[in-house]
Amino acid sequence: MINAPDRTGTRFALFALALGGFGVGTTEFASMGLLPFIAEDLDASIPSLGHAISLYALGVVVGAPLITSLTARVERKRLLLGLMVAFTAGNVLSAAAPSLEWLYVARFLSGLPHGAYFGVAAVVASSLVPRERRGTAVARVALGLTVANIVGVPLAAVLGGSLGWRAGYGLVVVIGLLTVAALALWIPRTRKGGGVSVAQEVRALGRPQVALTLLAGAVGFGGMFAVYTFVSPILTELSGLDISMVPWVLAVYGVGMTAGSLLAGPLLDRSIEKTALGAGAVSGVALAFFGLFAHSAVAAVLGVLWIGAMGALFSTALQMRLLREAKDAPSLTAAMNHAAFNLANAMGAFLGGAVITAGWGYRSPAWVGVGLAVAGLLILGYATRLHRTGGVPASSPVRTGPSWAYQAVSDLSVLLPEPAQLRPAAANSARMTDWADLGR
């Protein structure tokens, strides 16, 4: 367990963790706004640069489970510092890449620490505060990712347009260095990791509902990335917007994500299954709207807002599904959730670039997105049917605790060894009560 700092120290510690999330979120999505500038400087095509985005996502897919498994016993402050140093180094390589091939390598390396950082940051945040405030603590850390889409990504695009694309990645390097300093100053030392074994975590991935939920996210969320990866050239070439307007549209996407996250709370409080299915279906409609009307600048901006909102709602619903189905082994499952969404990133970027290369125009990624959204919806529908008909173990109890958002993240205490070691029966009983009614 972490030696809890005083209230002021806790605020600084949460800020340090959120700052890291801000940097990771900025680098993940900044490439989309930098594509035209990179293409011009490196004499590369837009579709070929889509592979750089795919390789970052593949880095997350590889790094999330691998690093989580290999560092299970590493002291968490040291692990956070190591992950952020590696992340910063990857972005230094990105900013200095002399060729497209080197950029590919740099983006892959930059993605490796992504999933592990968010997983460890959530556990550390929940350890800094009393149980009843853990939801708030983790939500504050997650705020870094939301702010990245509203501020960090547009700012990187502005720097890319005025100072060159390398300045966009340079911004991330500065954020990374500031995060390393903040983590070193404000995160308290912890005991070495323990608790749930890696073997138990791996077994949880084999559960049908866990596997199907991860697959639904990997496929369905790819629809959003098929469009968002190429949003900059779509807006300039198809919608007729000036390149200077792209950062503002990226900020609109961030606003949409924030709206979707806020909408998720009351909807998921009523039903996880209905919210997940509804968000997946409406995501497909939003992508179809964008495909039909992206030639209009106003419609394109509205479409970006809509896609961002539904993407956030869909991802939150799937995350809740995973928390419900793998509540006894959440560490690796949480890492694999990041991996699944970044696999969606890689798939969407690759397929979106493929149809552009084939000569089908900048409208075509939206139709790829619709196809992926429908496929993800079918997978999720099958998983929901199994859940409702008892095709999987019905182990979910009836919730008596507070709302979904705070209760879900508060159960991250399952990763902390003390409750289970000191009072196993009481801890397990409390955990079963916490997770009641999430199966609705």
Image: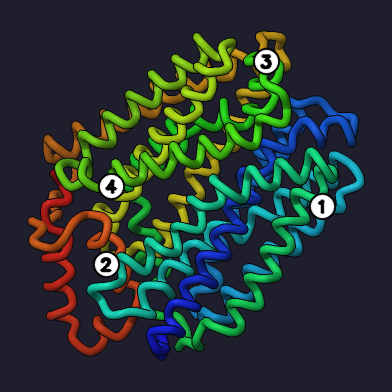
Identify the residue under disc 3: 240
The residues bearing labels 2 and 4 have C-alpha atoms spaced at a distance of 14 Å
Q: Residue at 23% of width from left, 73% of height from top?
A: 132
The tag on residue 411 is: 2
The tag on residue 95 is: 1
Label whose residue precedes the other's in the sequence (1 or 3)? 1
For the question of whether residue 292 can be seen, the reply is yes
Q: Residue at 48% of width from left, 23% of height from top?
A: 303
The residues bearing labels 2 and 3 have C-alpha atoms spaced at a distance of 48 Å
Left or right relative to 427: residue 353: right
Left or right relative to 293: residue 83: right
Q: Position of residue 439 (x, y in %)?
A: 16, 47
User: Dividing the picture into quarters, in which one does residue 203 lie?
Assistant: bottom left
Q: Nearer the viewer, residue 400 or 153?
A: 153
Left or right relative to 241: residue 286: left
Estimate how packed mark 4 is, as few (under 14), some (14 to 19) or many (20 or more) residues with alpha carbons within 10 Å: many
- Pointer 1 with pointer 3, Cβ within 8 A: no
Q: Amino acid at mark 2?
A: Asp
Q: For the residues carrying marks 2 and 3, which lies nearer the camera in this image? A: 3
Identify the residue under disc 4: 321
SS class, disc 4? helix
